[in-house]
Amino acid sequence: MSKIKFKLVNCDFCGLSKLSKLYSAKDNYHKRNGLFSIVKCDKCGLVYTNPQPTKETMSFFYSDSAGYFKPVKTSGKDSWIYHALLREYYDYYPHEKSNKIAKTILFPYYLLTFKKMKSEGMPKFVNEGHLLDIGCSYGNFLSKMKKLGWQVKGIELNKKAAEWGRKNSGLNIINSDIDHLKTNEKFDVITMRMLLEHVYSPKKVLKKVKGLLKPNGTLIISIPNFDGFEARLYGKYAYTLQVPTHLTHFTPKTIRLYLKSSGFKDIKIYYQKVDRDLIVPLEYMNEDGKNESHLLNILSNKLIRKTFVKWFINILCILHKTSRMTIYASK
Ligand SMILES: [Zn+2]
């Protein structure tokens, strides 16, 4: 391993170097040594990690054994109700006849599950549509989309994950980063699932992605929400902070600014429900010598996690205050 190097950067959004330091945080996720500063741009309010590990150094802060890269076996058949929901409300299975009775009966279920489906990044089906997943890892999401009838392609920087997806799931995964991708292909849908917070310049990536979309194509992004309740409550211990691999710490306001200035329209934000965000920071605090084991034991209790924690996260989600979001935007 060559020497670990960092560099100070200006705000990626507005280019300004005037900033205020919010706090320093440890790498609680990958457990690498060091203390990393979180700063906020005085002009546009963008929060980012500064200084940042250089490109050559960054691989040191990732590890293959971490949660990013895990192949997951896709489950067998979807339930009939899920299948019918996709057919009646999301245009899937175009060769099957729509059923008016089923559609009417499913309407309350559609309303109940609408936000969850959106927060999971489910696109409306486009017949013979092309979908690109940037940062697709082993291709778990791509496999699911392929099964649902999409023509799928993935880009993944981690060689091992890209190879695994190609070999075991028969997926078309290019081992590259988005900056170096050369293709004339245009896509109906592009997804970036927990990726944009890792890139050096979200501005550059969004510009490139816009060029890869067909007119009226849809971009679906999922990212942490720095303004979320758990992120605010736990601060430097927040599970979604993950410094220094997370370089930009978006809020609903700053991601909207980015998307608007990149020329995207119809921006809609949905909030994800992840109970880990409320519990894991207590483990980090314990590791750091703060004694939170009592609260951790209570919240980790299976029954409490399934009732109180779940209910609490539901309320946060209704208030648009969870610490992860899924954003839809059109070209
Ligand atoms: Zn700025």
Image: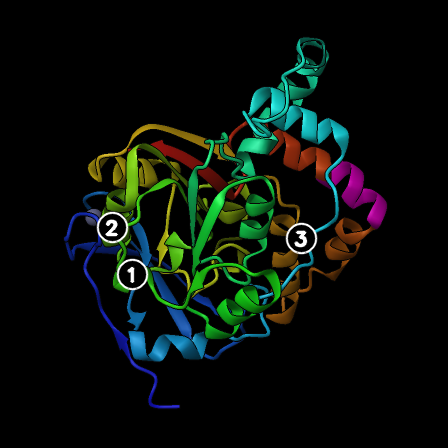
Identify the residue under disc 3. Answer: 279
Highlighted range, magenta: 302-309
Farthest-out residue, front: 95
Question: Helix or strand or loop: what does disc 3 sit on?
Answer: helix
Which residue is denoted by mark 2 in the rendering? Answer: 208
Toward the viewer: 160 or 221? Answer: 160
Classify mark 2: helix, strand or loop: helix
Indicate left or right for 72 with 184 as reference: right
Q: Is residue 20 visible?
A: yes
Q: Quadrant of residue 51?
A: bottom left
Seen in the picture, residue 44 relative to 53 is either above or below; the reply is above
> Answer yes or no: do the residues labelled 2 and 1 have beta carbons within 8 Å?
yes
Name which residue lies at 23% across and 47% down: 207
Q: Is mark 3 within 8 Å of ligand 1?
A: no
Q: Position of residue 164 (x, y in %)?
A: 56, 69
Q: Looking at the picture, how far across and down is residue 113, in whole percent?
A: 64, 26
Q: Nearer the viewer, mark 2 or mark 1?
A: 1
Query: Which residue is the site of mark 1?
Result: 181
Against 179, residue 88 (above or below) is above
Give me the C-alpha separation between circle 3 and circle 2.
36 Å
Q: Is residue 304 magenta?
A: yes
In this view, the residue in front, 271 or 74, is 74
Residue 107: give x, y in percent of width and height.
66, 14
Camera-nearest label, 3 or 2: 2
What percent of the width, then of the height, locates residue 34?
Answer: 43, 77
Magenta-drawn stretch contains 127: no
Amino acid on which the number 2 mark rests in the picture: Lys
Specify which label sits upstream in the sequence, 3 or 1: 1
* Residue that lies at the very extreme toward the left in this rendered image: 16
Label 3 and label 1: CA atoms lie apart by: 38 Å
